[in-house]
Image (cartoon, grey):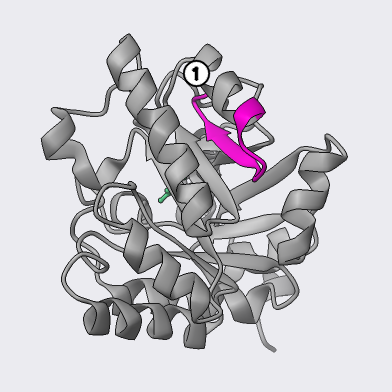
């Protein structure tokens, strides 16, 4: 997928698929899949580092993960997530952080929210870096939002999100993640915008869908309502780990086949 394809897919009503990917191993697997693009999300903080929010991850950390994913999936469109506050301090700091992700191998960056970000987005886009927006439940604002809750339920909130979506498009974003919003709101925004929306917990009305890889594989235990686990990897891994233990105890592993004479 190339940057131009995002708009082309929307025009053709072809859904965009995106999965998170943080490491070389899963990148190699996804490189051979039909998934359109890979998001090195700041959710890596929770999924791989065991943090209870996405706040405690640095741009250097994300850049390291981007580099690993790029090596595993060099031909996929890779989006690097700008971490908490990494784009809120000043222009120089923001651009240094953007540079880290792009030089690590990202094709685009993603950042959360519209308020106070629009000028920065214009500058990043004008510097040749595609920007994906993110509205609705923006996990970096969890303390402001008072928890991980559906956003845009009231008329006023919904109107704010619609306005911000248009502002992000006008600032130059090429696509927009809509997280945890009512389906009707996601539909209104998707219809209104020229750029594609990519939903997570936003119903099937968006121009694409994104999920956290470990969630959709059943390899993470704290799943939200919108997650569909297509596998039960946790149980399968546990069963194989137990089989390994049993075989070691019973002297079945290593057998002659796995030993040197
Ligand atoms: O970090 C992440 O995984 C994300 C997705 C949930 C969209 O931002």
Q: Is residue 192 magenta?
A: yes
Segment colored magenta:
191-202
- 136 is higher (above) or lower (below) than 40: above
The percent coordinates of residue 75 (x first, y second) are 75, 74
**Label 1, ligand 1: CB separation under 8 Å:** no
Residue sitting at 28 percent across and 58 percent down?
49
Q: Secondary structure at mark 1?
A: helix
Q: Is residue 36 magenta?
A: no
Is 27 left, or right, of 76 in this rendering?
Answer: left
In the depicted view, which residue is nearer to us: 184 or 232? 184
Residue sitting at 29 percent across and 16 percent down?
156
Q: Say if residue 254 shows up in the picture.
A: no
* Residue farthest to the right, as pictured: 12
Residue 208 image-quadrant placement: top right
Is 60 left, or right, of 194 in this rendering?
Answer: left
Is 242 left, or right, of 216 in this rendering?
Answer: left
Residue sitting at 54 percent across and 12 percent down?
184
* Quadrant in which the C terminus appears: bottom right
Q: Residues within 10 Å of mark 1 (few under 14, many from 20)?
A: many
The percent coordinates of residue 72 (x first, y second) are 65, 75
Is 45 left, or right, of 51 in this rendering?
Answer: right
Q: Say if residue 169 shows up in the picture.
A: yes
* Quadrant in which the N terminus appears: bottom right
The percent coordinates of residue 46 (x first, y second) are 29, 49
Total count of labels: 1
Residue 101 image-quadrant placement: bottom left
The percent coordinates of residue 258 (x first, y second) are 68, 74
Q: Which residue is mark 1?
A: 185
Residue sitting at 35 percent across and 57 percent down?
118
In the depicted view, which residue is nearer to us: 5 or 228? 5
- 82 is higher (above) or lower (below) than 247: below
């Amino acid at each position: 997928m190339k940057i131009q394809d995002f708009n082309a897919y929307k025009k053709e009503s072809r859904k965009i698929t995106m999965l998170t990917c943080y490491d070389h191993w899963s990148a190699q697997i996804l490189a051979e899949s039909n998934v359109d693009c890979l998001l090195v999300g700041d959710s890596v903080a929770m999924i791989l580092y065991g943090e209870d929010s996405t706040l405690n991850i640095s741009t250097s950390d994300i850049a390291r993960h981007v580099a690993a994913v790029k090596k595993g999936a060099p031909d996929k469109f890779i989006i690097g997530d700008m971490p908490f506050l990494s784009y809120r301090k000043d222009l120089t700091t923001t651009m240094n952080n953007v540079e880290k992700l792009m030089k690590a191998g990202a094709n685009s960056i993603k950042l959360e929210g519209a308020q106070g970000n629009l000028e920065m987005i214009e500058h990043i886009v004008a510097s040749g870096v595609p920007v994906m927006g993110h509205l609705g439940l923006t996990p970096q604002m969890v303390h402001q939002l008072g928890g991980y809750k559906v956003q845009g339920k009231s008329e006023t909130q919904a109107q704010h999100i619609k306005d911000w979506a248009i502002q992000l498009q006008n600032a130059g974003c090429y696509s927009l993640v809509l997280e945890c919003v009512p389906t009707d709101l996601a539909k209104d925004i998707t219809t209104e915008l020229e750029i594609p929306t990519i939903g997570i917990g936003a119903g099937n009305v968006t121009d694409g869908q994104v999920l956290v890889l470990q969630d959709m594989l059943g390899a993470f235990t704290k799943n939200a309502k919108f997650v569909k686990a297509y596998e039960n990897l946790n149980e399968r891994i546990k069963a194989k780990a137990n089989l390994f233990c049993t075989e070691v105890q019973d002297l079945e592993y290593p057998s002659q086949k796995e030993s040197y004479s």
